[in-house]
Amino acid sequence: TQLLEQSPQFLSIQEGENLTVYCNSSSVFSSLQWYRQEPGEGPVLLVTVVTGGEVKKLKRLTFQFGDARKDSSLHITAAQPGDTGLYLCAGPSNTGKLIFGQGTTLQVKP
Amino acid sequence: DVKVTQSSRYLVKRTGEKVFLECVQDMDHENMFWYRQDPGLGLRLIYFSYDVKMKEKGDIPEGYSVSREKKERFSLILESASTNQTSMYLCASSLQGALDTQYFGPGTRLTVL
């Protein structure tokens, strides 16, 4: 069974701090997606990484796909309260469906 | 912009009731999905549909059924609601299949008493 494990599950930091959240698996994925879900809303796609070792930047967010395509990380620089939300990684399963990690809940305090 | 709407944001039902959750998307997407979201478990796929009148079971279909009579509308049905179906239900759509970008609705928080 393919699983995506995210860590940490919860993170509470002050505005301006840096942070990294992780998405790990024992399985190889052809690609991984990162979604952000704000309170009261559905998840919204942030980025898709498809090549081992790939790094993508979205303003203050940096996404990296592991060389072996078994893991990914999301680094946020100088976090702001607007970054608060649930961060989900997702990847394609062997059966062609998208499977999700359990998510990292981030709270950024002003 | 793709818009996915869900009929209710909050719903309270009693055990044994039949419950309908409606989802509508406005971008002519072929694929539609129903997930449930529970703390610590992420999103789990209940059912999906890749065409009108077509449906496939996801990972946790027990206790649920679906209906897709029109391309833009995908309904989730709880035949006899139970307390363990209390959850957040998310609908999504995509253009080219489950692995394409999925666009989510705002969710329906269902409480079964």
Image (cartoon, rainbow, N blue to C red):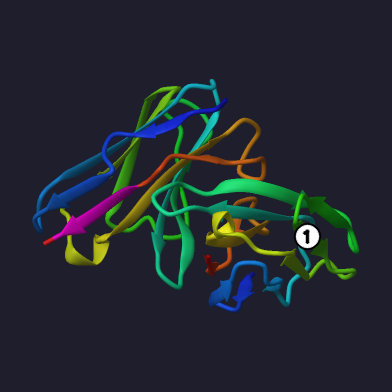
**Residue B111 part of the magenta segment:** yes
Identity of the residue drawn at 18% across and 65% down: B83
Amino acid identity at mark 1: Phe
Identity of the residue drawn at 43% across and 47% down: A41
Residue A45 in the image: state x and y as whole percent: 63, 46
Question: Label 1: few (<14), some or many (≥20) within 10 Å?
Answer: many
Left or right: A59 as drawn, with respect to B91: right
Q: Is residue A6 visible?
A: yes
Magenta stretch: helix, strand or loop mostly: strand
Identity of the residue drawn at 53% across and 65% down: A110
- Helix, strand, or loop for circle 1? strand
Tell me the chain of label 1. A
Question: How many tags in the picture?
Answer: 1
Quadrant location of the N terminus of chain A? bottom right
Of the pair B83 and B10, the residue shown nearer to us = B10
Residue A50 in the image: state x and y as whole percent: 83, 53
Of the pair B11 and B98, the residue shown nearer to us = B11
| Residue that numbered label 1 is attached to | A63
Of the pair B21 and A8, the residue shown nearer to us = A8
Q: Outermost residue, front direction?
A: A110
The stretch in magenta equals B108-112
Check the image and report above or below for B54 versus A27: above
Left or right: B51 as drawn, with respect to A64: left
Check the image and report above or below for B110 versus B51: below
Of the pair A75 and A60, the residue shown nearer to us = A60
Q: Quadrant of residue A19?
A: bottom right
Residue B70 in the image: state x and y as whole percent: 39, 21
Check the image and report above or below for B68 versus B105: above
Identity of the residue drawn at 52% across and 61% down: A86
Q: Is residue B79 visible?
A: no
